[in-house]
Amino acid sequence: MIEVRNLTKTYGAQRAVDDVSFTCEPGTVTGFLGPNGAGKSTTMRMICGLTPPTSGRATVGGVPYQRLGSPGRHVGVLLDASAQHAGRTGREVLALAAMTMGLDTARVPERLARVGLTGAAPKRRVRAYSLGMRQRLGLAYAMIGDPAVLILDEPANGLDPEGIHWMRGLLRDFADRGGTVLLSSHLLREVEVIADRLVVIGSGRILTQGDKKDLLGAAGTLVRTTDPAALAALLQRMGITGTPSVDGSVLVPSDPQTIGQAAAAAGVVLLELRPAGAGGLEEMFLRLTAGSDFEGAAR
Ligand SMILES: Nc1ncnc2c1ncn2[C@@H]1O[C@H](COP(=O)(O)OP(=O)(O)OP(=O)(O)O)[C@@H](O)[C@H]1O
């Protein structure tokens, strides 16, 4: 369990993180979502005791990170895939981590294999690793102490589609066994597939958070009709404002059943009627972060 309460971090006049609160429960993957510069890394660094908060607090399993004895056996952290010593081999990196935690290094080969680092890879120096291989090593490093909690900052960076698919399976399995995962990303689709809960941050502030299904449900319904004018009139009578898309569909802030029944009663022919789903999350994300003063474009 991770509990973040009113965390705030200021750098000079800038509030990098502004009164952020959320909870990550065992058995769930929480997607921490926000554009570049939103405050995701700073929040995670504060949870892991690497950046002191200006105010507020964060605990892991009820205890501040700094007070966890042998933290690697409680919390696996991957904040920067390039943090490992470039001159060490993958095997050396994991063996050192195991020794530091008082664990048997015999587990190292199996742990490397679990993240797909097989063949010559364990014996190669980290400086020769691709970013994707570093991410895999970083995941093995985070998980070597069999922690109950994982905190991962943009773990999919550098992974190819097969690697992203593999990572989803790994983290899903971890959560299904009762683990707690907090995972940041600016890749909306990636988070949408894997997360149970979403926390969306922009300009240091929480923009929305909750169950993914609820948030996506709230994202609305996509409707396509043979008669846009009749649909517009129907929505107006219902007091609903739809948003036309360039492809001719209309995003309606209501559920499919309500719209379908009203359209049938009004004799409006529908060609398509579905939860906004993936497009909904992206639309929601862009809408929520549109007003926030972020440094880069959401991708
Ligand atoms: N050590 C620091 N000194 C000054 N400003 C900082 C420092 N660390 C972060 N910031 C600022 O705090 C804000 C939040 O940065 P942070 O790295 O937490 O965002 P992020 O959501 O992780 O972004 P990204 O997706 O680009 O990694 C940014 O405006 C950043 O410039």
Image: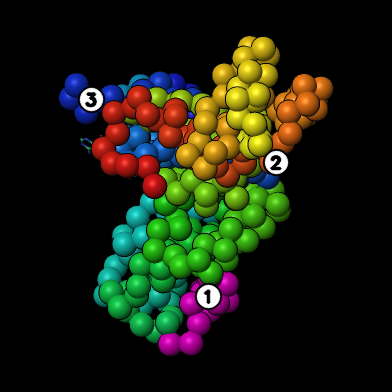
Quadrant into which the N terminus falls: top right
Which residue is disc 3 drawn over? 14
The answer to whether residue 6 of the structure is visible from this angle is yes
Which residue corresponds to the image point at 41% horizontal and 38% vertical from the top-left? 34
Question: Given this view, does label 3 or label 2 mark the residue nearer the observer?
Answer: 2
Element on which disc 1 rests: loop
Q: Nearer the viewer, residue 211 or 3?
A: 211
Residue drawn 66% across the image and 36% down it = 226
What's the amino acid at mark 3?
Gln
CB at disc 3 and ligand 1 closer than 8 Å: yes
Q: Position of residue 31 (x, y in %)?
A: 53, 42
- What's the colour scheme? rainbow
Specify few, some or many for label 1: CA neighbours under 10 Å numbering under 14, 14-19, or 20 or more. Answer: some
Chain-order first, disc 2 or disc 1: 1
Between 85 and 128, the residue placed more toward the observer is 128
Residue matched to label 1: 116
Q: In the rendered picture of this protein, how many numbered marks are placed on residues?
A: 3
Distance between the alpha carbons at the discs numbered 3 and 2 = 49 Å
Q: CA distance from mark 3 to mark 1?
A: 41 Å
Residue 168 in the image: x percent, y percent?
Answer: 58, 58
Residue behind label 2 places its C-beta within 8 angstroms of ligand 1: no
Q: Position of residue 157 (x, y in %)?
A: 40, 58
Would residue 120 appear left or right of 26 to someone viewing this image?
Answer: left
Q: Residue at x 22, y 28 (%)?
A: 11
Disc 1 marks a residue whose amino acid type is Gly
Amino acid under disc 2: Leu
